[in-house]
Amino acid sequence: MTSLFAQEIRLSKRHEEIVSQRLMLLQQMENKLGNQHTEKASQLQIVETAFKRNLSLLKDIEAAEKSLQTRMHPIPRPEVVSLETRYWASVEEYIPKWERFLLGKAPYPFAAENQNEAENTIQNEA
């Protein structure tokens, strides 16, 4: 019987060791899980902060781009628009004359106009 009693004591001690080891492993798992949750929360906070920073940077870039576009292409004053319109109307008017001259089919376009103006000035003076 003593051998059974000794074996019972050995098994009881072994059981206590196993239970103790189990408790230690459970505690380690809980600690690790807690650390993982803390780390995940920290990473989530970092991601949220980065997202907000990126949104802010994107808004700043868009504002700078809009500002640069406004500076590069300012809305012209009405006088400038009128002057530009008259300029292009004049260009359209003289294109056929210059086109014929450049193709070699007519003389220099302003030579004839200057000559006509000079003749009109002489006739008006007389």
Image: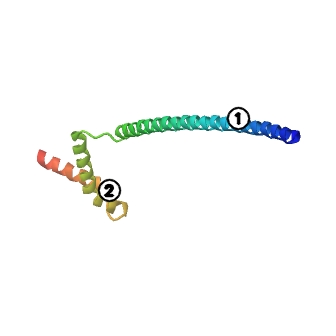
**Rendering colour mode:** rainbow
Kindly identify the residue that appears in the image at 33 percent across and 65 percent down. Answer: 105
Q: Determine whether the residue tagged by mark 2 lies in a helix, strand or loop.
A: loop
Q: Which residue is mark 1?
A: 24
Q: Nearer the viewer, residue 58 or 21?
A: 21
Q: Quadrant of residue 21?
A: top right
* 73 relative to 21 in the view: left or right: left
Taking 3 as reference, is 126 left or right? left
Q: Is residue 61 above or below residue 120?
A: above
**Residue 89 in the image: x percent, y percent?**
24, 52
* Mark with earlier residue (2, 1): 1
Where is residue 72? Give x, y as percent: 37, 40
Q: Residue 2, labelled with which disc?
A: none
Give the total number of marks visible in the rendering.
2
Residue at horizontal 64 percent and vertical 34 percent from the top = 31
Q: Is residue 62 left or right of residue 85?
A: right
Q: Amino acid at mark 1?
A: Met
Three-letter code for the amino acid on which mark 2 is drawn: Tyr
The quadrant of the image that shows the N terminus is: top right
Select label 2 or label 1 by which is in front.
1
| Disc 1 element | helix
Q: How far, Cα to Cα, is label 2 from label 1?
A: 105 Å
Q: Is residue 109 left or right of residue 46?
A: left
Residue denoted by label 2: 108
